Amino acid sequence: MALVALLSDFGVKDPYVAQMKGVILTMSPSTIIVDISHEVERHNVQEGMLLLASAAKYFPAGTIYVAVVDPGVGGSRRPILIETRRGIYVGPDNGLLTMAAEMDGIVNVYHLTESKYFAARVSPTFHGRDIFAHVAGHLARGVEPSNFGKPITDYVRIEFPKAEVRCGEVSGSIIHIDRFGNIVSNIRHQTLESENIGYGSIVDFEIDGKNFSAPFCRTYVEASPGSVLATIGSHGFLEVAVCMGDAAKLLNVNVGASIRVRRRNPNSY
């Protein structure tokens, strides 16, 4: 019994996700389909890359992943399949798949060229349904990855943005805002520890030109309701949150904003 995991920026208002599921189930009715997310910010390949990689490590070996955040659909970008030691990734060649696939250990990458595995008529604006879902359906039925196209090595990679450290200050960017309004940065816990920024300290922030301070807490409830806090979220990155509130709305912060972090000097109280 095959397992297919889906991720996209399609949302749930339109029938696009249902159409993809319908294609897969028509070809392989016993397939289990799991939704990772369909609320990736529109056209935000980097955010989709992060969410896919965050989720994939919790799925069983053999999972087929179909990810579609595809602002270049119908253009020159290639449709690809990545075979790894733990699973198979299907989607556009725009970097969306590679972070998760590299964590799994890439074995082969194929440019999807065998049109007999696509829909009879491929819409130039919906490869998610007419190429990627069809390929996933054939994979679920047991077709080998090598049958779908030609091996390639020049697939697109997106370098995950790295935080920078200078004179006790850590600089990075906001890479995700979750449903709760938590502001997720690209600053890893280990980077903060290297600058002696840890739980129990007070942290000075500058996010997109806005300056404020917050306690560094292990959990959201260590702060009083409605107050701003810093913590390490389940992704393993520094978050700015509001206990029982929405930090992104309160601070008017969007994905892509810059962030600077510094441990407050006790003498500055």
Image (cartoon, grey):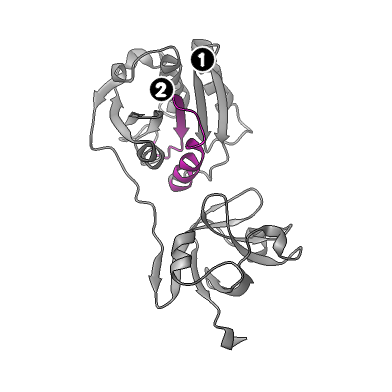
Residue 202's quadrant in the figure? bottom right
Q: What element carries label 1?
A: loop
- The answer to whether marks 1 and 2 mark residues whose Cβ atoms lie closer than 8 Å is no
- Can see residue 126? no
- Can see residue 36? yes
According to the picture, the residue beneath numbered tag 2 turns out to be 131
Q: x%, y% of residue 153?
A: 23, 35
Write down the region rendered in magenta.
46-72
Q: Nearer the viewer, residue 61 or 169?
A: 61
Q: Does the magenta segment cover residue 62?
A: yes
Q: x%, y% of residue 48?
A: 48, 42
Q: What element carries label 2?
A: helix
**Residue drawn at point x = 29 percent, y = 30 percent:** 107
Residue found farthest to the right = 225
According to the picture, the residue beneath numbered tag 1 turns out to be 1
Q: Does the magenta segment cover residue 75?
A: no
* Picture quarter with the C terminus: bottom right
* Distance of label 1 from label 2 (alpha carbons): 22 Å
Q: Which of marks 1 and 2 is in front?
A: 1
